[in-house]
Amino acid sequence: MRSRVSSSFAALLLASVSFLAPAARADWPSGGIRVSASYSAKFSPCVGSDGAGGAFVAWTEESGPDRLVRAQHLTRDGTVAPGWPSDGILVSAAVGFYDGVTMVADGQGGAYVAWDTADLYGGVGMAHLNSSAVALPAGSRVPAPWATASPASTGVPSPEKRRSGDALPGLAADGAGGVFFVWLHSTELFGCFAGVYHRWADGTTGAGNSIFAGYCPSAPVACADGAGGVIVAVASDCGSDDGNILVNHFAATGALAPGWSSARWVLPSSGHRDAPGIVSDGAGGAILAWQEGTGRPYAQRLSADTSFTWGDQGIPLCTKPTTSGVTRGLSDGRGAWFRYSAIVPDGAGGAIVAWVDHRGGDSTGTADLYAQRVTHDGTIAPGWPVDGAPICTAPRDQLLPSIVPDGSGGALLVWKDARSDTSGDIYAQHLEATGAPASGWPSDGLGVCTTPDEQDRPAACTDGAGGAIVVWTDSRSGTPDVYAAHVAPDHVVPTLISFAGFTATPGRVHLTWLVQDRILTATAYRRNAREEEWVNLGVLSPDGTGRIELEDRDVVANTRYEYRLGVMREGREVFLGSTSVLVPGSLSLALQGMLPNPATDELRVSFTLAVAAPATLELIDLGGRRLSKQDVGSLGPGAHVLDLRLEHRV
């Protein structure tokens, strides 16, 4: 790739830089990494662990009037996995408007991804991603149970009666490399139906089964039973006053599990209940969560012997007003939304449930996040408050919680946060097994991404080491994109402050840092590279775009200085964003080159302007195509380092 700086003449430099693909990075950049080199609009990201510290990511992407389903594989250090193209692989070609993408790891280094369409009769599809950048089978349609079952015996309408179709798929790994696929089928004439089928690791599939047939159930959720079968839950008659949660248990063959003759009600009495969630209890049964119509989260345990063990009504997780916070919508223009509970196993036979909490009021700007841990015997875990442990109670709304177990009885949680920007940022919190924030974590969490413009729809999966890989939709460039970040058990990777660039003249140094938390203040320090003592230059605050600027005129030509910022964390000062600057003695037009080299999501160019005159910086690839062009003459005479990523030029 070539870069060109022109004043009254052009200077050309040939450099080996590949910045479009995230493959060459050796770490996770501050504010996240773009998962695809494509600049098409992207939506609805989902993520699944690759079992080696990295993750598979899938999303929907605009392609003309249609949407595609594409996927990418990121390694543990944030690079694109070998063999995977920079813009990901095509999972399914456009046949309609896609939405509802979901993913689950297969436990053997791959992942399953599923989606729905809004074509004439709707449809659901699934593909299996492996580590070799192959989707097997790509874009396959999932066989429906009514293709082989008798409508008369199952209550499921025949294909010619369908009018709305299949939607909102869900996935549950079977523990042996295969997957259980559940989904919702709705018709204008016959209401809604929920189905399940099993795909084994070798690609063979069993006949589908109807979980439940009735009026307007929610999209089903499922978990493996540990013996090759699956337990499925669905909310029936959602939107009415007599809704309930139903559960059904199927063996690996697709037949009803022993002791089951049909779906069972979780509660004996009727009432408006929705937002189902389900996880394995590790002993052949499952723990279910839901929202009562009064706005309270509840849970119940289904044992392997088919009995409910936590009383007739289950147990309340909180007595304050709440909502589930997790939603998925149909993509057919009808505006139908379904709610789910955010739940994960605690690794000891219990579960952790997170929700949006309204104990501070139900108006906009008062939504907080709380979580509760319940043990295998139905009691609240020691250390956890009776009404849940706070995840974040910062000003304004905290929404859309996504939860990942930390492997030690606690959990990592990520969410959309409006504390400093009503358009939304992404934050994370680590709760220990006791319900308290982990050591070093602020009470209201840490910023994963707080760049300007909206960050939305976060999702997370485990990194296998107590941390999480987080993905979200990001509009920082003006077009919706998909970004990813790594959250370690003890911090967000990398630092919350990153150096962005500087300008140096014989009597002046101007530095810029990019700050993840825009309510943060920092103390600037400088020292002569030949000295040990740091000089305090004062306290700085970021502007509305998340930049901290420092102007230093107390410098000497031909001298090298070091600069850094100090921020307070847990009562002690932590130093971040260090950089070294050589103050020039005289100026001449020069292009020093690009850093890092090779580069991916980060690209900085270093150059010197001798005089105040018009100057242009152009980025040109090896084929002679101009990739970006911008005026740099306004920077004035001096040595400059420009972050092209920060300026949205690449």
Image (cartoon, rainbow, N blue to C red):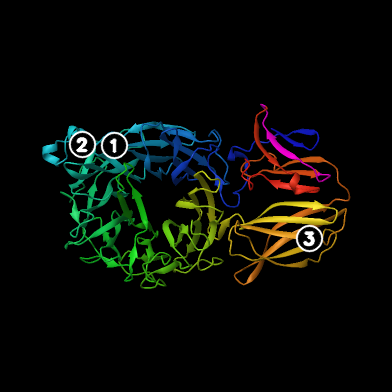
Mark carried by residue 122: 1
Q: What segment carries the magenta color?
A: 609-623
Instruction: Quarter of the image for the C terminus: give it.
Output: top right
Q: Compare marks 2 and 3 and give the one earlier in the sequence.
A: 2
Element class at badge 1: loop
Residue 148 rendering spot, x and y as whole percentages: 19, 33
| Residue 552, numbered label | 3
Residue 162's disc number:
2
**Mark toward the viewer: 1 or 3:** 3
Q: Amino acid at mark 1?
A: Gly
| Type of amino acid at the residue the image marks with label 3 | Asp
In primary-sequence order, the first of circles 2 and 1 is 1
x and y percent of residue 542 in the render? 63, 61
Which residue is drawn at the image coordinates 17% and 61% (left, top)? Answer: 270
Q: As drawn, is 231 to the left or to the right of 639? A: left
Instruction: Tell me the mark number nearer the camera, choosing from 2 and 3.
Output: 3
Amino acid at circle 2: Arg
Dividing the picture into quadrants, the one containing residue 98 is top left
Q: Does any portion of residue 406 appear in the rendered image?
A: no
The residue carrying pointer 3 sits among few (fewer than 14), some (14 to 19) or many (20 or more) residues within 10 Å by Cα, namely: some
Q: Position of residue 441 (x, y in %)?
A: 54, 65
- The residue at the point 84 percent across, 59 percent down is 555
